[in-house]
Structures are given as C-alpha cells and as structure tokens.
Amino acid sequence: MSSIRDISLAPVGQQKMEWAWQYMKILQSIQKEAEKEKPLDGLTLTVAIHIEAKTANLCRVLRSAGAEVILTGCNPLSTQDEVVAALVADGFEVFAWRGATAEEYEMHIEQALSYRPHVIIDDGGDLVAMLHGNRPDLAARVIGGCEETTTGVMRLRIREREGTLAFPMYAVNDARCKHLFDNRHGTGQSVWDAIMRNTNMIIAGKNVVVAGYGMCGRGVAQKARGLGARVFICEVDPVRALEAAMDGFFAVSMDEAAGVGDIFITATGCKDIIRKEHLMKMKDGVLLCNAGHFDVEINKPDLYALSKEVVKRRPNIEGFVLHDGRVLNLIGEGRLVNLAAGDGHPIEIMDMSFALQTLCAIDMAENGKGYAKKVLSVPAEMDTKVARLALSAMGGSVDKLSPEQEKYMGK
C-alpha cells in the first residue's frame, strides 16, 4: 500500500506529466517498441528516483514494457507530492513524500524493496546501499540494474573494488548521451533556473564560485558566464584547474574565493567543500547552494555553529545570521538545488537520460544473469540509438561513411 501525502493532488500532477510527455520524443519512440515486445513482462522493477513529472513518464514507459514498477524517492526534498498522487491514481505503488525525515526516507526505501525487485533503477546509490545493508536476502533475486548519477556510480565502484557488489549495475552516468548533456547542459541550466526563481536576483556582474570542474561544474560555469557573471573555479585536480583557466575562468582555492564570491555552488560529489574557515570569510548576503547529490558539500553543522539564529527569508531560502550580523543564505537546505528548489533538468535532457535508463533496464532483464557482478559500461549502440533519436527530434541529421572511408578508418 502506497505511502503518500495527499491523493487529491493527482490532477495537478497529471497535468505536469502530460506537459512533459509532449516533449519526450525519445521515450515515446522507445515506448512504441516496448509495448509490442513487452521485454519486462512479469518482472518487478524498483525505482529510487527524484519523483517529478519526467521521472513519472519514465515509469509509465517501464510499465508499458510489461514491468510492475514500484517507486520511492532518492532525496528527501526532491519528491513532488502532486506527481506522487498522480502516479498512485494511475495504479502505481509509490513510497515517498516531500520533506521526509531521515527515518521516513529510509522507511520508504525499505517499503519499496519489500516488493522483491528483479531489476532496480537507482539515483545516488541509497537503494543499492540499503539492499546490501538491510535486505541482503533480496540480492540473489536481483538480476541487476542501473545508476545514473556521478555520486551513485562512485559508490558502486567502491563496492566493486571491495568485492561486495551483489549484482551487475550499468553506469548510465558514464554514457556519452548522459554526462555530455545531462550533467553539463541539464545541471548547467537547471541550477540557474532554481537560483533565479528563488532569489529574483540578477546574475550579471556577480562573482560566482563553482567548486568542481567536472561535467556538472563545467555546465554551471558556462551558463554563469553566459548570464554575465565573473566565474571562479575551485578544484583539487591540477589538470581540471588548468582546463578551467584555459576556458577563461579564474582557477583559485576556496580559501581565496571565500571572501570574493557572491554566489557559491558546489558540484564535486565530495564532502566538506565549504567549511567553517570559508564561511567566516564570506560577505554579507552571499548565496550558498549545492548541485551535488547529497547535502554534505556545504558543511551545515559548521554553518549552524557559527550562527546565532536561522531565519526563513524566502521559500526554499534560510538565512544564517552570524554573531557579527552577516547573513549567509542557504538555498534548498544545501540539498540538490535544482530539484530541492526547482523542477530539475529540462525535459528534453531527461528524455535522453531516461531513454538510456530504459534501454539498460531492458538489457539487464534480458541478459543480466550472464553478466559479472561489476559496474558495466553502457554499450555504444545504446548511446548511438539515443543520440540518433534525439537528433531526429531536433530536426538534425548526420553523414554516413562510405565503404572506402570505413576501410580507411579501419572499421
């Protein structure tokens, strides 16, 4: 039995889903194939994901492929209750609500796992972690699954190195049609959508500090420059820092950036990127937000310890009033800002990522029993298929090598 906030919100959620579906041309194409072939017939899929309109449409496609789909959240603040209600009204079992406590969040994942999945789709790695830790009895039943985030894949690789990964998992995040577009353009746009929507402030002329110059950080930095900001990059990798410098950004340490920045955005996948010593240097009125999966990149205990009070300044913004009167503003509780305080990545971007998730889930269901218990790369043909469908939806096309050219290239 589903655990949700308010079933009466279903019409609003359904409206959101219908809007998104109109622009999800790749999934529409994949759904037509899946409805005919039913490759997931008879299987249970447990999906831990940010439950919003686009992810809801992913789950509908998976059900069209024959699966029983069970949903739970992957972040306490990214669930949209109206979309949960719409899914439940549509016959799905869902265990999630926005603002779940740590105990409720874990309870929801455990409830979703109680349906004994054959295939899993994870976002961030909490589902896999709980399955291995709390419900190892279910591992033998799991054929495999897929993970779409940088953080989640990192956690899987640690488990693989330790020899404790109980089933194969596709690293969807590493696919070209994921990290080149979702991480860069998706994160880049949606982070600024959330910041601007929640602050009503201009970005032009601001000093923006981006921690991490991976694909997500690059996207955030590029969009910030396009909005007229001066952009500072903080990195631990000298090669990435050099790349940022040659891309036209200022490569500095966080110690140097702390007293200069107006807006700070963490996108590293690591913890304690912004700490006490940095917070003490910051200007009055700065904005702090995180684009990484977990709320550990900005050290919130340090922020609380330095503050004499915390005040609600706007929806999704808390003001931490320091003892000297300065106010440091935290957006979305330091959680994934584009979902905790926004609607997440653009529809067309997630259409690509969810197409990959669907294809990987189907392949795992059909072939996973023969795969090693490792983190697997997404097959190139899946990447190519999604790229061709996406390009076609945009009205684009590509050239084709002649036989002579293929011979010359050694193909």
Image (tube, rainbow, N blue to C red):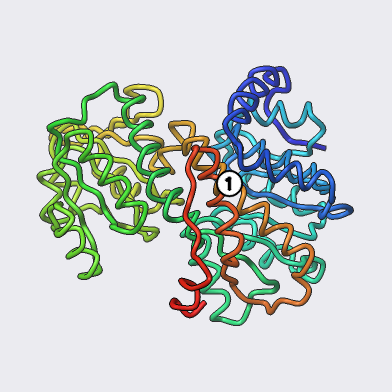
Q: How crowded is mark 1: few (under 14 residues within 10 Å), some or many (20 or more)?
A: many
Q: What residue do we see at 78% from left, 62% from top?
A: 365
Q: Position of residue 99 (x, y in %)?
A: 55, 34
User: Relative to residue 159, is residue 203 depicted above or below?
Assistant: above
Residue 199: quarter of image: top left
Q: Where is residue 175 in the image (x, y as percent from the top left)?
A: 51, 61
> How many numbered marks appear?
1
Query: Of residues 79 and 15, which is closer to you in this image?
Result: 15
Query: Of residues 344 and 247, which is closer to you in this image?
Result: 247
- Would residue 92 be found to the left or right of residue 410 on screen? right
Residue denoted by label 1? 389
Query: Of residues 172 and 384, which is closer to you in this image?
Result: 384
The quarter of the image holding the N terminus is: top right
Q: Where is residue 260 in the image (x, y as percent from the top left)?
A: 10, 44
Residue 385: quarter of image: bottom right
Mark 1: amino acid:
Leu
Q: What residue do we see at 73% from left, 51% from top?
A: 46
User: Relative to residue 294, is residue 22 depicted above or below?
Assistant: above
Q: What residue do we see at 13% from left, 38% from top?
A: 283
Q: What residue do we see at 47% from left, 42% from top?
A: 396
Residue 85: quarter of image: top right
Q: Where is residue 387 in the image (x, y as percent from the top left)?
A: 53, 52
Query: Of residues 183 and 154, which is closer to you in this image?
Result: 183
**Dot 1: element:** helix
